Image (cartoon, rainbow, N blue to C red):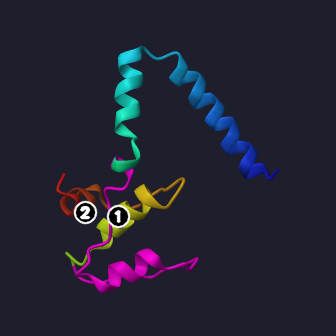
Amino acid sequence: MSTEAGGRRAHAAMARAVFDTMPSLDRALLEAAFRPQFAAAWKPDPGNRPQREAYRSKADLLLYGGAAGGGKTDLLLGLALMEHACSVIFRRAYGAFAESSGG
């Protein structure tokens, strides 16, 4: 077993221990939030070819740039939600993220 797999199992065991001690209403709300149909909510914009291709890319390094409104932040958040086990997204300023995400 790899160190990474062992680390994931340890984290899963800790999460299960915390989950098991939660009040039943909190557990039900958490389970509802992570149902498969909720996780499948994001898909690339069908009309945005670069975003679709970037989403499907198997590259280790992907460079995707362009003007505001091109779907870059949406792609980052979609990949983080749908494809990555762990994601960290850095922006130069929070305002840039808040403006592009509607927050």
Q: Are marks 1 and 2 in contact (CB under 8 Å)?
A: yes
Residue 62 x/y as whole percent: 49, 80
Residue tagged 1: 92
Q: Amino acid at mark 1?
A: Arg
Q: Is residue 50 left or right of residue 79?
A: left
Q: Place residue 34 in its image quadrant.
A: top left
Q: Which mark is residue 23?
A: none
Pick the front one: 73 or 39: 39
In reply to whether residue 57 is colored magenta, the answer given is yes
Q: How many marks?
A: 2
Residue drawn at x 82%, y 50% as measured from the top left: 1
Q: Which residues are the magenta region?
A: 38-67
Residue drawn at x 32%, y 60% as measured from the top left: 42
Residue tagged 2: 96
Compared with 42, 39 (above or below) is: above
Q: Please, what is the dominant secondary structure of the magenta stretch?
A: loop
The kind of secondary structure element at disc 2 is helix
Residue drawn at x 31%, y 85% as measured from the top left: 49
Residue 8 x/y as whole percent: 66, 44
Residue ranking furthest to the front: 37
Compared with 41, 60 (above or below) is: below
Q: Residues within 10 Å of mark 2 (few under 14, many from 20)?
A: few
Residue 37 x/y as whole percent: 35, 49
